[in-house]
Amino acid sequence: MPRAAAVHSARCARAAQEGAQWLSRFRERGHLWAQLDPLGRCRGPLAKNDQWWQDECIEHPLAGLRMGRGPLFVAPEELPSATGWWSRENLLQVMEEAHCGTLSVEASHLSCPERRRWWHSAVELKSQSELSGARCRALLLRLLRATLLTQFLRSKFPATKWFGLDGCEALIPGLYRLCHRSAQHGVERIELGMPHRGRLNVLANLLGKELSLICCEMNENRSDFHVGDVKYHTGYFGALPVLPSAWQQKFSAAECEVTPPVLSVIPNPSHLELVTPVVLGKVRALQDEGSHQVLGLILHGDAAFAGSGLAFEAMQLARLPAYHCQGAVHVVLNNQVGYTTKPYEGRSAAHPSDVAKAFEVPVVHVNADDLRAVDRAFRLAADWRQEWREDVVVDLVGYRRFGHNETDRPAASAPLSYAKVASHPEAAEIFAQRLVVEGKLQEQQVQEMRAEILDELNREFLEKERHKTDGLDWVLGKYRGRIDEGRRPKQVRGITGVPLETLTHIGEAMVRAPDETLTEVGQLLARREAQLVPGGRVDFATAEQLAFGSLLLHRDVWAQSGGTGSWAVAQHERLPHKNVRLCGQDSVRGTFNQRHLVIHDVNGMEVQLLQDLAPGHQAKFYAFNSTLSEAAALGFEYGYSLGDDDALVCWEAQFGDFANMAQAVIDEFIVSGEEKWGQPTRLTLLLPHGYDGQGPNHSSARLERFLQLTNDDPNHLPGNSPEDLREIDKAFDILDTGEGILKEEQVKSYLQPASDFELEWELWLKTAQSALGRPARGLAAGVTRQEWRQVMQQLYRRNAEKDANIFVLNVTTPAQYFHVLRRQAHRPFKKPLVLMTPKYLLHHSKATSAFEDFSEQNFFMRVIVDYSPLLTELASRSDNTRHLSTSKTGAPLTLPLESVRRVILCSGQIYYKLSHKRRSGKIKDVVLVRLEQISPFPYDRIIKALSYYPNADVVWCQEEPKNMGAWFYVQPRLATAGRRDVAYVGRPAAAAPATGSQQIHAEETRLILDAAFAM
Ligand SMILES: Cc1ncc(C[n+]2csc(CCOP(=O)(O)OP(=O)(O)O)c2C)c(N)n1
């Protein structure tokens, strides 16, 4: 090659190499030089001030790149130009504009070239399309509304804390653009989660919550809200407002091109980031139910997003099978301070959004003072989500004009910044001036806009008395029904047993396996099959699958004409099928090798059980292994239970202890969500619990913590308080016609208003029979005042369950587990269920139930008594975990009731150890009473059970240390029930839940068992 040509070719190669360098330098580091801070304190993020940062990052991205003359060649698909080459000046201009202006995208960390290219072309190629005058005016209008609202509220409620948006008002037009653009893409519903800041502004300007109502709440005009929450935590539901028609004509007809999506803000506690997984869970549930056009939108503070592990955990969920929800939009409301903490004190990374980069989520940084850039940033986010159905982050960089809240003084800790803030004009002022200079608006029009908005705000303010808030305005109408429901007892029995034919049908589907199933699993399925026949004994894992299957199966394919029993048609209709979702670490196979919900064959073929019970006639079943998270994973399931509020949603901890990683979700949402926000849930927590000598960390699900969170008063026996008694007597007085006796018709007239009268009456009769010990015939003569009291007191005790915040149970038999799962899904009121679940009992041959125990005549028993007079009628029951009779001779295993020396009350797996000792020691003067439902405390059943044994003393026996387990919960309630003399048997108080030594564990167990039976 001639020398000149060779030189030319080398130059070209160098220019191409340099061109590529220029592109990647701007794309990778442009954001560090972008004009993001509205206060102009720095370029790039307001972050580090150490040497490394100075040397490496604050440098202009051009540092090291050669300026001067000569072309740069850039591959055509990278950045096309007509000539195939760029002059340095032109390329500099294009790339600076694209990456170092008031908007800058980080996408270099995406592994997928196509996705990177999408962003590059979005910001480099497409010239920033000029916004029409109409759009600019609409933008300004939204910005002004946000700005004036904060100013207005500040002036009207100077001493109230509500976390105004000042300094980041661009959030409102930005979010509006996102919602509107998403609607253009087909989104119909947006689930929004956000922290305190800007909440009222979002509610008013995006969800259309009336300002008069907001002002009314600012005055704390609450009425029937039991506890409630502060105004910046509550939720709301509304449609994205279109501009009032007068504004539309003036500004932008384009605003009303699409059907506005509905938005729902999910209530949240102060705990920052806790609501993030909840939003995702709710969105997924709605999508699973077929609402594909649902978008999750989550707002974060900059300090919280960078610092909270929850944000990381929640973002981890985005692409996982159990959790993905077609891309969520995250917005960091980056006011560049967290209370008083500066960015360099609060995070190690450059931007608060950097956590997203771990998950290949693109980030759009934008300066909140440049409204056009804000509009573009949110539009890009909506377009990305539409194109790829993946997460995206918008980092809206603003500042905080005032303190952390309205009563805070910020200058003390940040004097320089606040001096700058003081002289910095509002975004609305900057934008309005720009439009005036550009001739898109006249100064006078801006004044008119302000005046009109203020006028509207003042009008609304005067209207505030119109609202008498009940704190539940945000809730969908259906919840009102729940709140208004009477306090009448509901029939909850009889909903759990299932015809055996139906169970057999489910069982057949449960044991279907691929051809070459692994031997071990094949054997397990064969064992399962053998359980599901008359006389078979069913284990826990099989019982669980029967419960799931029976919930899934449509009623029209249940056993016809009642199967083994008599199902009234009306009852069929009451029990619709339910979706079931189970998620937890290794839950699909089961931590204890018990479940095997997916059967693998030797070639890797998979069959998921319970998916083909009856094609087209079953609800949806989802079983997933979760990511190794507790807080986000549980938050997600809670959210899911809100989105599909009829489903049985179960979250399983690998071992119960690990639930404490999610304690805030439990405290803030699960146990208190109904009381704070009228947001009930049926979420079920499965927490493996039991002392098997596995050490301090695999023994206890911290039962005591859940019991401490229950809201029942240990000193109040429902039905026994003066108010309850007054109510009961008053009803008698109203119904009594002077005879001092209430006849059947009178009782019926009392129950008549209830919609499900038949059930009410049936329940009343049953309760009366059990409370008065009279057969049904004997009731025809009527009941006296005293008897009426007895019956009603018992009903009140049962009914108290409706006021409980959670249910805490520890069941001992597979049948009980089956019945309680079914009860949980079908009971008329929604309550969270915390279930201590077994570990070694899963494979313990004694811990099985007869197949017949699942049939219709059976139901969940809150208390199981070994031996009582009632058992004569139940003696046919096949529950062989009880001490009914010796299997060989049929002779009673217990002395006559008066001769019983001791009642041992217990709960959970220790029952089996006690039972073994009793059997092997042939101890006949001690009976065992199992508390299967610990909370709400089953006063009625316990009082009844203890009354059978007039001469017995009572001990409470538990495996846990004295300061743990159920003792502290049970003791005062037993006292309220009249038993102050109950002795404690269990481990002594301790700091750790259990020992790590098998030997010590065995010795402790021996001592407990000895003490429990000791004379
Ligand atoms: C889990 C949790 N920890 C601490 C707090 C206390 N707290 C309330 S606001 C706040 C600062 C939050 O800063 P940022 O996330 O940037 O949001 P900003 O208030 O600035 O909008 C802190 C530490 C909290 N609410 N939640």
Image (cartoon, grey):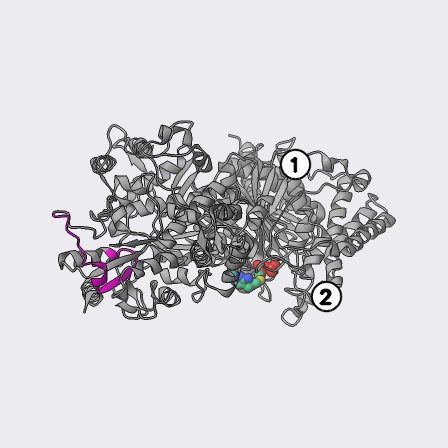
Residue 373 percent location from the top left of the image: 68, 46
Q: Amino acid at mark 1?
A: Lys
Q: Quadrant of residue 877?
A: top left
Left or right? Give the position of 219 relative to 504.
right
Identify residue for label 1. 126
Residue 461: numbered disc: none
Residue 115 percent location from the top left of the image: 53, 37
Q: Which residues are magenta?
A: 889-911
The answer to whether the residue bearing label 1 lies less than 8 angstroms from the nearest atom of ligand 1 is no
**Local SS, label 2:** loop
Identify residue for label 2. 158
Residue farthest to the front, as pictured: 739
Mark nearer the N terminus (2 vs 1): 1
Of 276 and 785, the residue lying toward us: 785
Residue farthest to the left, as pictured: 889
Left or right? Give the position of 487 relative to 915.
right
Let me know if residue 350 appears in the view.
no
